[in-house]
Image (cartoon, rainbow, N blue to C red):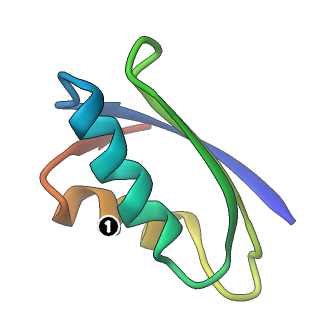
Amino acid sequence: MQTATLNISGMTCGGCVRSVTKVIDALDGVVKSQVSLEKKRAVVEFDPGKLGVEQLKRAIEEAGYEVNQ
């Protein structure tokens, strides 16, 4: 397993956190995710054989948020 920390801008409320969490958790290969509004980031544990960091970023960006590395 691999862990990625993604800095996310554009989240303003608990609904945003739920939206980002839902998008991340729907990806095949995600084992666990923790999205924080206060820290403006997501920590994602995933299987690198099924999923890459770029796919995580793209899914979050397609949901309307910006990922800053």
Pick the front one: 55 or 45: 45
Q: Residue furthest top?
A: 38
Q: Is residue 29 left or right of residue 6?
A: right
The residue lying at 36 percent from left, 64 percent from top is: 23
Q: Is residue 20 left or right of residue 24?
A: left
- Picture coordinates of residue 41 (x, y %)? 46, 30
Q: Quadrant of the C terminus?
A: top left
Q: Is residue 5 above or below residue 37?
A: below
Residue at the disc numbered 1 = 58
Number of numbered discs visible in the structure rendering: 1
Label 1 Cα crowd, 10 Å radius (few <14 / some 14-19 / many 20+): some
- Picture coordinates of residue 15 (x, y %)? 23, 37
Q: Residue furthest left?
A: 64
Q: Is residue 39 above or below residue 7?
A: above
- Picture coordinates of residue 12 (x, y %)? 18, 22
- Picture coordinates of residue 26 (x, y %)? 46, 75
The residue lying at 43 percent from left, 51 percent from top is: 21
The residue lying at 39 percent from left, 60 percent from top is: 22
Q: Is residue 52 above or below residue 2?
A: below
Q: Secondary structure at mark 1?
A: helix
Q: Is residue 6 left or right of residue 13?
A: right
Q: Quadrant of the N terminus?
A: bottom right
Q: Residue furthest right?
A: 1
Q: Is residue 45 above or below residue 12?
A: below
Q: Amino acid at mark 1?
A: Arg
Where residue 47 sits, quadrant-wise, is bottom right
The residue lying at 34 percent from left, 37 percent from top is: 17
Pick the front one: 8 or 34: 34
